[in-house]
Amino acid sequence: MTQSTLTPIRFENGLWQGHLQAESEPAVKVQYLGAALEDVRVSPAKDGWLLSIPVPVSALSDGVHCFVIIDTATEDKLGDFTIIAGAPATGDMRAEVGLLRAELDMLKRAFRRSQNESR
C-alpha cells in the first residue's frame, strides 16, 4: 500500500480544498480544537480525490487556528493548514505551537488506544 499524498489547492470563500492521491477512496477526518469537523467531503477527481473542508466561522477570528487532516484508517497525519487572523503575527511560532499541540493530542490518543488494546 502506498502512502497517500495531500496537495493544497486553494482556500477561498471559507472552503479549503486539496487534492489527495490515494489508491482507493480515503476516509479522512479534520481535527480543529480537539474535535472533528463535520461536512468534510471527499469526491472523485482526476488522478485522485478532491478534499473539501468547510472552515467554521469561529475559525475566522483573531488568533491562530490550526487544522489537522488525518487518515481515519491508519490514524496517520495527511496534512494540515493554519489560518492566522487579526493583528499581524509576530512570527509563525504560534502556528507551529498550535500544530504541535494538535499532533501531541493525536499521539496521546494513539498511545492510549494501544495501551487499552494490550490489556
Image: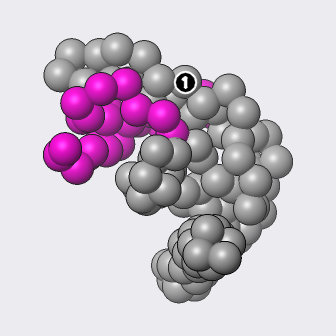
Image check: 72 left or right of 45? Answer: right
Tell me which residue sits at (48%, 56%) in the image.
75
Give the image location of residue 94, x and y in percent: 60, 81
Mark 1: few/some/many CA within 10 Å (<14, 14-19, 20+): some
Q: Furthest-right residue in view?
A: 58
Which quadrant is the N terminus positioned in?
A: top left
Image check: 27 left or right of 15? Answer: left
Which residue position is annotated with label 1?
Answer: 41
Picture quadrant of residue 55: top right
40 versus 81 height, above or below: above
Give the image location of residue 52, x and y in percent: 51, 28
Q: Furthest-front residue in view?
A: 119
Tell me which residue sits at (75%, 61%) in the image.
33
Tell me which residue sits at (51%, 39%) in the image.
28
Q: Amino acid at mark 1?
A: Arg
Q: Secondary structure at mark 1?
A: strand
Which quadrant is the C terminus positioned in?
A: bottom right
Image check: 52 left or right of 32? Answer: left
